[in-house]
Image (cartoon, grey):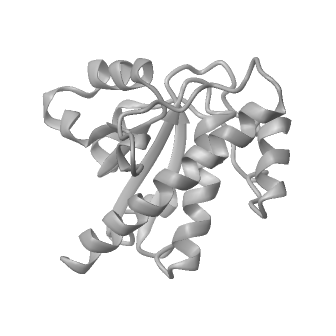
Amino acid sequence: MAAMDRGVMEMRVLLVCMGNICRSPMAHGVVRARLEAAGLAARVGLDSAGTHGYHAGAPPDERAQAAARRRGIDISDLRARLVVAEDFETFDLILAMDDENVETLLQAAGEAHRHKIHLLMHYALGEPGRTVPDPYYGGPIGFERVLDMVEEAAESLLARLQQELAGR
């Protein structure tokens, strides 16, 4: 969390799913790549976490890594972690993959931080509010679908972050 030093990053985004081994690490990789390509990686702190600590310390699921790698994104450096109370203070945006995780985050956040919590797909064009399905128990096509959805949302999220940063 040292890279999240408030004095260094102008904005901080946390991506959240249940176990932090499939959806949120894939989203982390996609958004990280977009931030780097836009020259914003030094201005936007990015992390991912899970609402459940089942896999704390584990790398992303091999299928998630393989799907991301096919799109030129390396997520092998990421490690699963549990959302902690400090995250609600540290992050400006907390983006969950589905309604269940949004609800868990809202219950844990407290009134002062609830405004930061949204679905990642809130940023997608077309059907905002869709949820990113968990591919864990499915086949490889599920991981590809997650990446398609995350890429769709990442474009609008990047535009929002650029707008926010321009206003600072």
Q: Nearer the viewer, residue 89 or 165?
A: 165
Left or right, 125 with respect to 20, comes to left
Left or right of residue 85, residue 82 in this image: right
Q: Is residue 32 above or below residue 75?
A: below
Residue 168 appears at what percent x and percent y? Answer: 20, 77
> Which residue appears farthest toward the front when viewing the image?
126
Q: Indicate the quadrant where residue 70 lies.
A: bottom right
Which residue corresponds to the image point at 75% horizontal and 53% vertical from the top-left? 77
Q: How many marks?
A: 0
Residue 42 screen position, x and y as percent: 48, 76
At 40% from the left edge and 60% from the top edge, which residue is drawn? 156
Q: Nearer the viewer, residue 146 or 51?
A: 146
Q: Is residue 145 left or right of residue 82?
A: right
Q: Residue at x 47, y 62 (%)?
A: 155
Is 93 placed above or below 164 here?
above
- Image quadrant in which you'd find residue 142: top right
Residue at 28% of width from left, 24% of height from top? Answer: 106
As displayed, is residue 54 above or below residue 6? above
Q: Position of residue 113 (x, y in %)?
A: 21, 37
Q: Residue furthest left?
A: 111
